[in-house]
C-alpha cells in the first residue's frame, strides 16, 4: 500500500536493541528505513524473514536501514533472551529492537503480524504492507525511495521468489483459521468447554468438528495455553484444511518433552515430515515425533499439498500448547488441485 508523501512521520522510541546500538528515526534521516513488525513464533512473520534479510544485504550499502520491531504475542516472547535466540537462529543480521510493552506497535497504530513500513529520506511513511506476499512490489518501493536519494543508482534484477509457492502461478487456498489454545481466545470443542484456570480430566466426543481443537486426559487451562498435567495419556486432536500445520509450544517445567504425531490415524509419512519432525522404530513400528524444549513455533507436518486431515498429538505431562497455525500456498507443479478430505 502506497501512502501519501509528507503526511506522517515515524515516532522516536525503542530501548533494547540487538545487532546494533540504539537507533532513532531522526538520526536515520537521509536514509530509507524499512520497519518490520514481527514475532519469532509467528509463521507468517517467519516466512517473510528471508526477504527482509535479503533486502538488508542487497540495499544496506545503497541507503537502506532495516529495523525489525519484535512485538510479542505471548508472554514468553517478551523475554529478551528468547528474542535474541530467535534472531540468531533465523540468521538476522539487521538491527532488532524489543517492543515488549507495545510502545512502537501503538505509536504506529499497527494491528498485524507481520507488517512492513517504508520511511523515506525525510522520515515520512510512504509504503506499508500487511501479511505475506507482494515481495516484488515492496522491493520496487524500496528502490523508488532509494532513487529519491540518489537518482543515479543502478540495481540488479528483483529477487527471485525464495519458495516456489511465492512465485507466479502459486496456488493459495483458504486454510483453517488459526487456533488459540488458551481460554482467553481459544475454541475448544470438548463438551463443557474450558475449565478455566483449573486442571480437569477431558474426554473426546464421538465426532470431531472443524475449526476447533480437542484435548483428552488431564490438562491445565490458562488464559494463554493448555498444559498437559499429571499421570496418564494426554492428547491434542484437531481437524484441519491446509498444506502444513505448526504449533507454538514450550516445556515450562524444564527439560525436553517428546510428542508422538499421528495424521489420519497413522504415523506421519516421511514424505510429509516437517523440519521439526523426527522418526524412530519401536517394536518394529515406525513412529513420527518431535521434541519440545525451547518456547517457539514447531513445524508438525508439511503435506506439500492442500487437503483435509485429522492431526493427533500424544504427549507426556509438562507440554504447554499455545496456538496452531496453518500454511496454504503450494507449488502448482506439485498440487494442481486439493486432495480429497480424510475422515
Image (tube, helix red, strand yellow):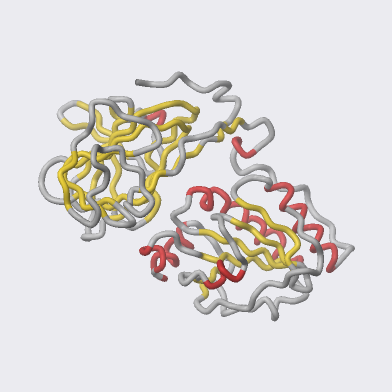
Q: Is residue 90 left or right of residue 123?
A: left
Q: Is residue 270 left or right of residue 195?
A: right
Which residue is at the far top?
A: 340
Question: From this viewpoint, is residue 175 visible?
Answer: yes
Quadrant location, the C terminus: top left
Q: Is residue 141 left or right of residue 185?
A: right
Q: Is the residue 181 above or below the residue 210 in the image?
A: below
Residue name at image x 59 percent, y 40 percent: 163
Which residue is at the far left?
A: 231
Q: Is residue 251 left or right of residue 82?
A: left
Q: Position of residue 112 (x, y in %)?
A: 56, 55
Q: Is the residue 185 above or below the residue 59 in the image?
A: above
Residue name at image x 56 percent, y 31 percent: 173
Q: Position of residue 196 (x, y in %)?
A: 25, 53
Q: Report the number of numbered marks.
A: 0
Q: Position of residue 265 (x, y in %)?
A: 28, 25
Q: Position of residue 323 (x, y in %)?
A: 38, 48
Q: Quadrant of residue 284?
A: top left
Question: From this viewpoint, is residue 298 visible?
Answer: no
Q: Nearer the viewer, residue 301 or 232?
A: 232
Q: Is the residue 45 above or below the residue 330 in the image?
A: below
Which residue is at the far right?
A: 152
Q: Quadrant of residue 107?
A: bottom right
Residue name at image x 72 percent, y 72 percent: 9
Q: Nearer the viewer, residue 117 or 105?
A: 105
Residue name at image x 23 percent, y 30 percent: 205
Amino acid at each position: 500500500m502506497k501512502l501519501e508523501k509528507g503526511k506522517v512521520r515515524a515516532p522516536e522510541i525503542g530501548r533494547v536493541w540487538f545487532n546494533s546500538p540504539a537507533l532513532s528515526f531522526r538520526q536515520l534521516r537521509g536514509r530509507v528505513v524499512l520497519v518490520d513488525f514481527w514475532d519469532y513464533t509467528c509463521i507468517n512473520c517467519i516466512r517473510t524473514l528471508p526477504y527482509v534479510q535479503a533486502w538488508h544485504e542487497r540495499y544496506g550499502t545503497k541507503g537502506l536501514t532495516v529495523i525489525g520491531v519484535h512485538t510479542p504475542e505471548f508472554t514468553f516472547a517478551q523475554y529478551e533472551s528468547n528474542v535474541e535466540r530467535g534472531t540468531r537462529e533465523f540468521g538476522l543480521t539487521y538491527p532488532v529492537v524489543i517492543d515488549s510493552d507495545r510502545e512502537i506497535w501503538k505509536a504506529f497504530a499497527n494491528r498485524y503480524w507481520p507488517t512492513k513500513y517504508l520511511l523515506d529520506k525525510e522520515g515520512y511513511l510512504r509504503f506499508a504492507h500487511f501479511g505475506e506476499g507482494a515481495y516484488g512490489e515492496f522491493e520496487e518501493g524500496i528502490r523508488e525511495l532509494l532513487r529519491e536519494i540518489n537518482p543515479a543508482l543502478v540495481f540488479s534484477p528483483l529477487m527471485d521468489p525464495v519458495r516456489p509457492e511465492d512465485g507466479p502461478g502459486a496456488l493459495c487456498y483458504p486454510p483453517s483459521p488459526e487456533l488459540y489454545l488458551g481460554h482467553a481466545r481459544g475454541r475448544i470443542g470438548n463438551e463443557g468447554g474450558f475449565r478455566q484456570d483449573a486442571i480437569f480430566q477431558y474426554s473426546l466426543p464421538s465426532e470431531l468438528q472443524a475449526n476447533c481443537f480437542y484435548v483428552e486426559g488431564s490438562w491445565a487451562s490458562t488464559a494463554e495455553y493448555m498444559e498437559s498435567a499429571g499421570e496418564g495419556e494426554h492428547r491434542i486432536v484437531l481437524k484441519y484444511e491446509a498444506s502444513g500445520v505448526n504449533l507454538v509450544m514450550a516445556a515450562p517445567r524444564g527439560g525436553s518433552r517428546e510428542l508422538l504425531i499421528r495424521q489420519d490415524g497413522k504415523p506421519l509419512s516421511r514424505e510429509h515430515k516437517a523440519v521439526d519432525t523426527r522418526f524412530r522404530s519401536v517394536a518394529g513400528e515406525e513412529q513420527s515425533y518431535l521434541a519440545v524444549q525451547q518456547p517457539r513455533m514447531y513445524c508438525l507436518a508439511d503435506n506439500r499439498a492442500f487437503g483435509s486431515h485429522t492431526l493427533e498429538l500424544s504427549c507426556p505431562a509438562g507440554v504447554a500448547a499455545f496456538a496452531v497455525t496453518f500454511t496454504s500456498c503450494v507449488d502448482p507443479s506439485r498440487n494442481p488441485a486439493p486432495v480429497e478430505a480424510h475422515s
